[in-house]
Amino acid sequence: MLGFGKKKTQLPVDPIEAQEARQVKEVSEDFQKGVTALRDFIAPSSLVFSSNFFQLGTRYARAYYVYGYPRQVYTGWLSSIINLDEVIDLSMVIQPVRTEVILNNLRKKVSQLEAGIQIDTEKGRVRDPAKQAAILDAEEMRDKLQVGEEKFFRFGFYFTIYANSADELEVVSHRVESILGQQLVYSKPASAQQEQAFNSIVPQFSDQLQIYRNMNTGAISTSFPFTSADLTQDNGILYGINMHNAGLVIFDRFSLENSNSVVFAKSGAGKSFTIKLEALRSMMFGTEVFIIDPENEYQKMCEAVGGAYLRLSLNSSTRINPFDLPQVVDSEEADNALRSNLITLHGLMRLMMGGAQVEMQGGGGAVMPALNPAEEADLDSALIETYAKAGITNDPLTHGATPPTITDLYDTLLHMGGSGPQLAQRLRKYTSGTFAGIFSQQSNVNVNNQMVVFNIRDLEDELRPVAMYIVLNFIWNKTKADKKRRLLVVDEAWQLMRFEDSANFLFSLAKRARKYNLGLTTISQDVEDFLASRMGRAIVANASMQFLLKQSPTAVDVLADVFKLTSEEKKRLSQFPIGQGLFFAGQNHVHIQVIASPSEQELITSNPSAQQAAAEQDIYHQTLTAASNRSTPPQQQKEDLAAADPADGIFNMPPDPKVGPGPTRPTSQDVAHRKSADLTSGVMASTHSDTLLPSSGEIAVSHREDKKP
Ligand SMILES: Nc1ncnc2c1ncn2[C@@H]1O[C@H](COP(=O)(O)OP(=O)(O)OP(=O)(O)O)[C@@H](O)[C@H]1O
Ligand SMILES: [Mg+2]
């Protein structure tokens, strides 16, 4: 060896100098020994290797290698190990193999097999299907290799398990071996090679075991372990439990590109429950919540949090004036305020005057316009004139004046030429006729409250879309005024989708909500109808967050098409129990179980018997408290409840959701779900499976799942 480039440090020739140099070297080495390095912090106190386990400080560990795989591996076979609540180190070694070598081998194999078949025929033997299948497999592989569609790799998979005692190690070993064994993946402890195995598994890029199995690209891609999309963010609210890995789904919908969501499920599957829970928990972060409640379901919750509950009906004293203008500060917004309200009013007038005529027959039928072009033009000038009479023009300074009402519009129409009087006649129902009052006078509702619920249950069916439209516009105006985080929940939204104008309006809200920090939640049980309309589909497309709870079998096909569900997801969708569903947030799909704390449950359940029980409990409690504690004023108690309850869902979470998700004790049904949850992991993987494919070079992926604190 000539030692190019490197100059050997030559010891001085003089023996005394050499002696000194040696001494200096020894002293400096001794000094280095006394310095604490990073190694000293991370190294275990000792490492003792036995034949089939080793001790790492006080911990026991066993290194394994995998030697057998099934003929066909499916996506996510590793996720059951990853999601196991044990400390496991995994290491994968992936080495590319030259395609020519494989092609050569395959060619030999194919000629052997074909010769075998030929001999069989010559000897008059019965055809052997196994041989033919093997030929087909090999031929297919050759084709794919030839065009570069597949590549070949050598795949090594090693892992270490840890435990606190030798006994525990046996238990963990047994668990891991059997979990892998169930999937026909066979593993063995690296007997007498624990040290080499350990070295191969720690992330230092050296494979000392060299136990490989040939795999093609497709097969190797299935070993990507992170199949269950974990949806846990640092901030956000708790939506439920991730059924794949029993993790929590904590999520902030305002962090998505838009904060809209849609919820679809059949009746009684838990749509309103889920959304009420979200509303309660969002309020803790200061989000304002507006709800349009067609079923009188939200009252209890609203009262408990001290919200405003407004009943809209012909008998109630609530008044909302659709002519109200937003009191905006933003100058550009203010310039447009009148114009955008005029557009909204056009839609509203069409709805009021046309109503049933424009009902869309499944979205596809011929739509008859409620107003002809001449009528539209007359209406337009009447609207502008009505505002002008009240002193309101495009100038934002005039927008503070008292707005006109429908009655004023009626007067204007009546006294103008053209189609005005006819239009006035069609509008009369709302000014002095059956539907007079509610929308034809100045607004008297105060929405300065963190939760405002508009109950439209007692409104006539015919008036509902109109009312929903007016309420939405009212909320929209409020939203424009200041950009706080707000949620707007439209329950039973299919009622709006029946009419083109109201569907259009909801869609325009969905499109523009993001700019005003508004999250629109659209709930619908009538999936087919909702998705049959063009606007319905557009609303779904504009929602970054989607909830699909249990569906009727007929709805599943439509949903699968719109949401691009996999066949496994489709299958599950019609079988979910109450409160379980698929949660989509951006690109993530999670199988989720929505859970509430007992106190939340009491506020939001719509189960009549549960409500009855809660009411009885309440009376019982009230009598008790009244008797024992007359000093606390009742108002105070109510506020305490409101303040404490929503927090339960986040802060009173059970420490280990696997043991029993909160208030719902694990029933036999639960256990069945949890089992089935494992199966779904394959479904969820589809989006990720092909992302981790190595392109070249030796790759050792080492991952440590350290779930125990
Ligand atoms: N995650 C859950 N945990 C426990 N109970 C639930 C859950 N989700 C729903 N429920 C219960 O199921 C029942 C129906 O729920 P909910 O009222 O939310 O149904 P829905 O889908 O809104 O039905 P509809 O379309 O008829 O309004 C209620 O009694 C509710 O308390
Ligand atoms: Mg409901």
Image (cartoon, rainbow, N blue to C red):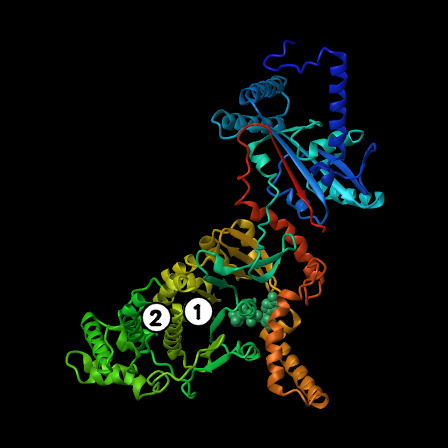
Q: Is mark 2 within 8 Å of ligand 2?
A: no
Percent x, y for residue 632?
A: 66, 87
Q: Residue 697 at x, y = what percent?
A: 56, 27
Q: Residue at x 56, y 70 (%)?
A: 280
Q: Is residue 3 above or below residue 322?
A: above
Mark 1 lies on residue: 493
Count of numbered marks: 2
Q: Position of residue 126 (x, y in %)?
A: 63, 25
Task: Indicate left or right for 145 with 84 as reference.
Answer: left
Rendering quarter of residue 36:
top right
Q: What is the secondary structure assignment of the residue under circle 1?
A: loop
Q: Is residue 330 left or right of residue 705?
A: left
Quarter of the view holding residue 88: top right
Circle on res. 329: 2
| Upstream in sequence: badge 1 or badge 2 | 2
Q: Quadrant of the N terminus?
A: top right
Question: Marks 1 and 2: CB-CB under 8 Å?
Answer: no
> What is the crowding at mark 2: few (fewer than 14 residues within 10 Å), some, or many (at least 20)?
few
Looking at this view, name the residue that lies furthest to the left. Answer: 417
Does residue 574 appear anywhere in the picture? no
How far apart in space, not on screen, are marks 1 and 2 (Cα)? 31 Å
The quadrant where residue 50 appears: top right
Choose between 359 and 548: the one closer to the eye.
548
